[in-house]
Amino acid sequence: MKTPLSVMRQFALRQNLLSVKALPVFGIALFPSLMAFAFRVFKDAGLHSRFDFYGEYLAPIFLYLVLPFFCMTAILPLMHSLYDKGAIGYLVTRPTPRWVILLGLYQGALLAMIPALLLAVITPLLLLSIGDTSGALGGDSASTGAWFQRAIGLFGVLFMGSAAYSAVCLFLGAWSKKAAIWGFGLLIGWGATIGSVPGLLQPTSPHRYLFGLLREWCGIKEAWTGFFAPDLDPPGVVLSIVVLISATALFLWMAWRASRSRDIL
Amino acid sequence: MTSSPAIRCVGLSRWYGEVQGLAGLDISIDSGVIGLLGPNGSGKSTLMRMLTGQIRPSRGFVELFGVRMGPDSHDTFRRVGYSPGEDVHFENERGIDFLKLLAGLQGEGGPAAIKRAEEALQKVSMSEYAGKKMSAMSKGMRQRIKVAQALLFEPELLLLDEPLNGMDPVSRRSLIDLVRNHATIGGTVLLASHVLHEVESVTNRVILLHHGRLLAEGRLGEIRELIGRKPRRVRLIGTSLRSIAGDVLSKELATGVSFEDTGALLIETRQLNELLLHLSDIGTKGGIQQFDVEDENLEAIFNLLVGDFSE
Amino acid sequence: MAFRASSYSRYTGVKSKRPAWVPVMFSTWGRGWKSKWVRRITTMSLLLAIALTLLLYALNVAIPDWRTIAQSLGEMGVAGDRSFQITNATYLGLLNLYIHPFLLPLSLLFGYDLIAGDLRTNALEAYFARPLTPWGYLFGRTAAYAGFLLAVTLAPMLWIWLFDVSTGPDGHFHDVARVPFGMTAAMTLVALTMSLLIQAITAITRSGLWTNLVLLVVFFFSGGMGTILTEVTDNPEMGAIAFWNDIYVVSAGFMGVDHEISTRLPSFGLALTVLLAICGGSLLVLTRALHKRTLVG
């Protein structure tokens, strides 16, 4: 049976997956593949194995660049298109609570991100793993199981991160006209940067917990980029999941509050 | 027990920074068609948005069917259909999908939603364009889609913000009929417009807004009568205008005369009908090439009502 | 035969000699200046310049020999291998202090809706119905935006330099004489590139929000890509993909300190070529976008 929630979900899916707006998200999804391709062409059999490249090179790139921009390009234009010219007025003047509208938009946008996330994770996996005989530092090459475990883990981490940061973007879209600038500040500044620099603020950032999951689910302990500072007390899986789900819930609630207090002009 | 009015505004005010959108509006509407008239920027759309809980009042409150409107008063929209003044910005959606989406938000899905959408499209003669994307529709078509979505669930109260904008004459006619029919079956319609004759073609009950204030409320005839007591201006172009000026002054048909830089004669009068009869008698033989009664448009009526005649 | 109202008469009064692009430039400034954050960032830039000036003044007055002392300390190895001299490289560092915190935020706040707004609202038709050519329009917008960037970044740096050489010891001017020319050349190119790039993006996206998102993606992904490709290929020239690298290398080159910067960065020639290519590509996009509009109506 169709409920208002499922109707909104389908609307967001349609908007984000079946329109030209899907192209930037898929463009961003192909960025790791480009890097994987360059690695195969230029650096194969070098100091790092392909398996290490997938984990210690690409995984941080996923978290620092792909994830924040995925969420920003998926959610902010959707919210902007509704709020910018008052189109949201058509939706909020129906006998449906505003939280249902927002939750439907959020769920639809998150679902629409899944194909792009799969593309981002699987294409580099295929590019790097097919014909992988080089092995790590000249040793045995990683097993197919290890490759897939890493890929599935990475997808899980990215999905958890998308859930949290999409909620942040949903809040920003409902709250501010300059959501892109706030999004940049929050996702890149607070998320990616503060979450990877040891200090008092680090535990407040979802990125720290995403790195925790990355360690546990993908076995990635180091990162080539240098940003990924070893955490002396890395959060475990349970704590990470609890914090990320709580952050998601908190920002969804804040989005609802913002939608109640923002005038539709 | 007395039933609550369809619309009730009490001391409704809204500021946008230092600009006043609405100032202490008190109105109560029970049923029938009411025209909300006002020039651009008079506060019509602000009022419409406040009625639908999209904008919070700075002061005062709004009630629809006795329910105070705000961000959580969504249940009231089972009885209300709202057509905003802004264009439909769901460019990627087809007409039918847009209506299905909104029907779905009203709790109706699947074939029932499609049926609703098709019926609404039929009411605005848009059935053949149901599958057309919004981005490919003309402004008039989009206007009709806007009205269709307001009619989806045959609401008791219709709030229509500038619904006739951009519509062709045939569509206008059918929308006017639709609005009238809605009122005859006991519904209430608040129709906002800045065009006097548009409103006049639908109803003679109006609310006049000007600079966010309630200027007048009642029947158009009463308002016209009120205007009738104020001096009016007639502008004449032709030859022998000086003798005509002397003539109307001597016959006490004018309270004052003046000449514009272009040479046109401006006659100020409190006996408009008598003056017009007299000017008709003079006619082209007397040298009148053209005459216009000024202040017939809406802006001028507002000027008259606020005593701004001297301008 | 031309159709004309009977009351029409040709205007024979005094006509303004001001070029048509000048009002476009002023209106662009007015539009940008309305943003609260643009005003705040500009103020921050000026405050930074005042703070640095005050620091120089305090040092020169309180410890007139501070440059000599600092140099000696550096030579003695007290401060590692640093010699504490104010050189062209110091100014390059200071310039980066201005570029990084101000260039991107100002682009996001000031430039995001330069042409998008006009395209969206069909204002271009109104512009081109006046005696304003597409090139004039483009010039007005570019001059306004590039001029604003220069005012916020270059002008404070020139002020600091002027203060430094006027209060410094006799030989100091000779040490840093190239700085103002280098800085002006570098920042003019950077501001022009930014201005044209952002206008090209806004002409394509026709949306302020998408312009900002694309600009952020260009900046950050080019940075990531440049770094990874440099590592993967062992070729520093790959770093030219990163926009920031190009800005830094070109600034260093114009200020004569390119030999002091990292060997993991692209060469001056390539970085300059990339910036010029961005300018050329952006101009091409803009010309096409504006040309299409002039054919409308």
Image (cartoon, coloured by chain):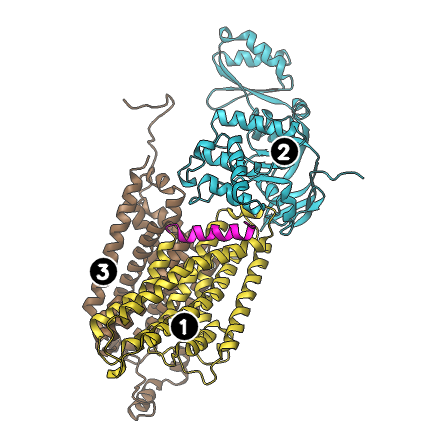
Q: Is residue A221 visible?
A: yes
Q: Mark 2 belongs to which amino acid? A: Val
> What is the quadrant of the C terminus of chain B in the image?
top right
User: Does residue B215 lie above or below B222 as drawn?
Assistant: below
Q: For the residue marked with disc 1, what is the amino acid?
A: Gly
Give the chain ID for the yellow colour. Answer: A
Magenta-drawn segment: A1-20
Between residue A182 and residue A204, name the one nearer to us: A204
Secondary structure of the residue carrying numbered label 1: helix
Above or below for C245 versus C278 = below
Q: Main secondary structure of the magenta part?
A: helix
Residue B309 visible in the shown view: no
Chain ID, mark 1? A
**Chain label for disc 2:** B
- Cα separation, mark 3 vs mark 2, equals 62 Å
* Residue A105 picture location, percent across and down: 50, 55
Three-letter code for the amino acid on which mark 3 is drawn:
Leu
Q: Is residue A10 magenta?
A: yes
Q: What chain is colored cyan?
A: B
The percent position of residue B227, horizontal first and vertical second, equals: 65, 25
Q: Which residue is mark 1?
A: A153
Could you tell me which residue is drawn at 39 percent across and 38 percent down? B136
Observer-nearest residue: B63 or C33? Answer: B63
Question: Residue under circle 2?
Answer: B189
* Direction from residue C177 to residue B123 in the image, left or right: right
Residue where numbered disc 3 is placed: C276
